Image (spheres, grey):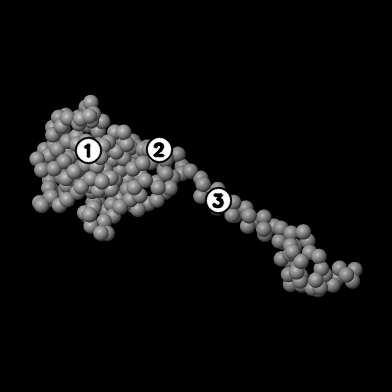
Amino acid sequence: KARDRSYILGVKERKPFWEGPTLVGAANLGKVALAPAVRYQENAMSSGVTIQSQLLRPNSERGGVVVLDFGGQYTQLIARRIREQQVFSAVLPCNSSLEKIKEFDPTGVVLSGGPSSVYDPNAPECDPNVLAAGVPVLGICYGMQWITHTLGGKVENAGSQEYGRASLDRIPAAPLAESELFHEVPQSLRIWNSHGDHVQSLPEGFCTTAKTANAIAALEHPGKKIYAVQFHPDRKSVE
């Protein structure tokens, strides 16, 4: 009993198996007694955080389209047009990590327009691995220029801004039998432009599928599932 009492008062004794040897005074007795429960709770919380971080998003947020925002004025409109087709869409900052994008298990990614020039030192950009993620990618306006610039094509100042209505003409997309992007679309379209830069030369393996009087209006690489348009298909003024 004396030995048991000295243990309570703080004499160095063998401690329970969940603790290492140390001085256990009366003030610490409660902590010692609760140690297994506290540690179990901490482990459970830690496991919960790990599980939570690994959980997939709700099914209602998966399998849709992720729109990466490069600062364009029509980004939210793009997302809305997608939802109007009964497809879920989520808008993320353009610099979101690939892991963040994959949380949505997207069936496609849209790169929005933006006011910057891709050749500016501080131009917004996204993870280039998005272009090799195995899902279709559609670049719109700045998105098209970013794709071109990133994959080795050339983008330059157009000299004068194209803004407003324009006429687009489809062109033979050799070596493609038919453009996947413009499948069953009329030969000519009325479109809406808003850009001051344009694509001068394409990245390797891409082909031009449409032009306006002043610029390349669309390009694609079906093998890589990458498509791009210089105009804004989200605008209702587009036929």
Mark toward the viewer: 2 or 1:
1
Relative to 149, say whether 176 is above or below: above
Per the image, the residue denoted by label 1 is: 219
Query: Pointer 3 and pointer 1: residues touching (CB < 8 Å)?
Result: no
Q: Position of residue 239 (x, y in %)?
A: 16, 35
**Residue at 40% of width from left, 47% of height from top?**
98
Left or right of 83 in this view: 100: right
Per the image, the residue denoted by label 3 is: 50
Q: Position of residue 194 (x, y in %)?
A: 16, 48
Give the residue type that dot 1 points to.
Leu
**Residue at 51% of width from left, 47% of height from top?**
54
Q: Is residue 88 visible?
A: no
Label 2: state its secondary structure: loop
Work out which quarter of the rendered image holds the N terminus and state it: bottom right
Of marks 2 and 1, which one's residue comes earlier in the chain?
2
Per the image, the residue denoted by label 2 is: 63
Mark toward the viewer: 3 or 1:
1
**Residue at 40% of width from left, 38% of height from top?**
63
Left or right of 110 in this view: 26: right
